[in-house]
Amino acid sequence: MALPIGLAKKQQARCCMEAFVLYATFQYFLNAILTHWGSTFGVDFSAAVGGSSGLTTIAGIKTLDMGMIGALLISGIVVFIHNKFFDVKLPDWLGIFNGAAFIVIIGFFILLPVALVAAFIWPTIQHGMVIFQNFIAGTGYVGVWVFVFLERLLIPFGLHHLLAFPFYYDSAVIAGGVKAAWIAMLPELAASTEPLKDLAPFAWPQLLGLSKVFGCTGIALALYKTAKPEKKTKVAGLLIPITLTAVLAGITEPIEFTFLFIAPLLFVVHAILAATLATVANMFGVVGYLSGGLIETAATNFIPLMKNHWPTYLTLLIIGLIFVAIYYFVFTFLILKFDFKTPGREDDDDIVFKTKAEYREKQSNGKAAIITDSDMALQFLEGLGGKDNITDVTNCVTRLRVNVKDGALVQSDAYFRAAGAHGLVHKDKSIQVIVGLNVTAVRDEFEQLL
């Protein structure tokens, strides 16, 4: 449902229904194929669902357990078909099949070979995934370190959810996923004085959230420390909101993408430190629903469990503060050692984080005004080469994602920062404008302009 809402260029609601119908159709195809030829593909389709069978039930249909990867695959195919063929006009005598019906018809024939391919290759992929998940789940502290390290390292590629979700919501560690199991156990955990790690040893995959609270704080302090004296005020104006976003809400993209494309080495170091922080915390008995920011953590850990488990959280605080210092000193050293041009250290005075008021003042010849989301969208559109240069536009939590016809028409990173963005990622015809948490409003204005 999320992919059509986010990626369909028009008629998102119809695309959601198309995705649902064709996802069910795909499961029926798999069921029929494996019922007759399961042994050919190495699948014992007579086995019970669950466990190590690799089978599950979806909408009452016995099928291969492809988890959220299968759902995303089918939904992505449907979105592609929808965007390409939804506006196709059939002859009048076939008019009843226009629009969503036409997409389902096309999808029916496309998903049959897709189901054949899935039946052929997914059992092998599934076996490899089980081996990898068993390695992470069965190697103790090594598994904790590898899991958190890879999760952080996959963020720039948008693939971190593919690693984490089988642990969070599927049965890689415990039936039903770590998050549901932890919430279900809260009354038992609150009533017991036994160590949390003894009561819920499975609840380690969510320790990656510790780097959001403590790691991002240390990074922000280092970025402020290494900024040029005359730029510290402006850098603080950037860092305070994006650090609070990470610490309170667990959304790390704004601060991580601030230095990721400037100094990828820092991001690798961040992944190493995040993995080490989670592992050390687990060694000292810390487990829990700790994948988000402080708001989520308080609701699912501190508030219900503090009475009987305060020693665990005191231990966590001490370890976390130590790692704030480690992050601070390591990042400060690396930034100065390699002279990374992080915010506030740019050589060009134009490449700074201008405030919205400053930008409007410059545009109005000294008459100060506050830049609105509409103003920002207009400047972004002009900087991207104008309406005729735009192919499509979407957004994630913090970034405006735009595909353009001619990448050479796109303005510089400095232009977009002056217009109110936090930076620009320019890869040929694929553009990401790092806007911030108001990106949805900016996208709405941007689409109105289009």
Image: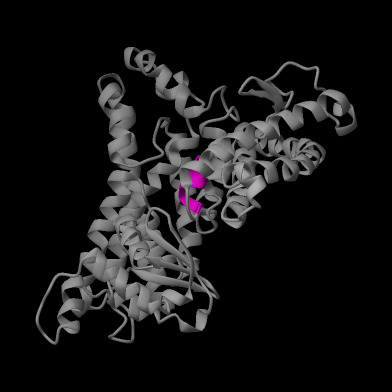
Residue 426 vs residue 26: left or right?
Answer: left
Q: Quadrant of the C terminus?
A: bottom left
Q: Quadrant of residue 366?
A: bottom left
Residue found 38% across the figure and 65% down from its top: 434
Q: Position of residue 218 (x, y in %)?
A: 32, 56
| Place of residue 141 in the rendered image (x, y in percent of width and height, measured from the top left) | 55, 38
Q: Residue at x 28, y 69 (%)?
A: 376
Q: Say whether residue 418 is left or right of residue 30.
A: left
Residue at x 72%, y 24% (from the top left corner): 52
The reply to whether residue 342 is in sight is no
Q: Quadrant of residue 135?
A: top right
| Magenta extent | 1-8
Q: Which percent across, then down, holds residue 214?
A: 33, 48
Furthest-right residue in this view: 40
- What's the residue at 50%, 39% (across, down)? 1
Q: Is 132 in front, or is 407?
A: 407
Q: Is residue 450 above or below residue 41?
A: below
The furthest residue to the left: 367
Colouring style: one colour
* Magenta stretch: includes residue 407: no
Res. 391 in view: yes
Q: Quadrant of residue 368?
A: bottom left
Would you say 217 lies left or right of 172 here? Answer: left
Check the image and report above or below for 162 versus 414.
above
Instruction: Say which of 188 and 14 sits in front.
Output: 14
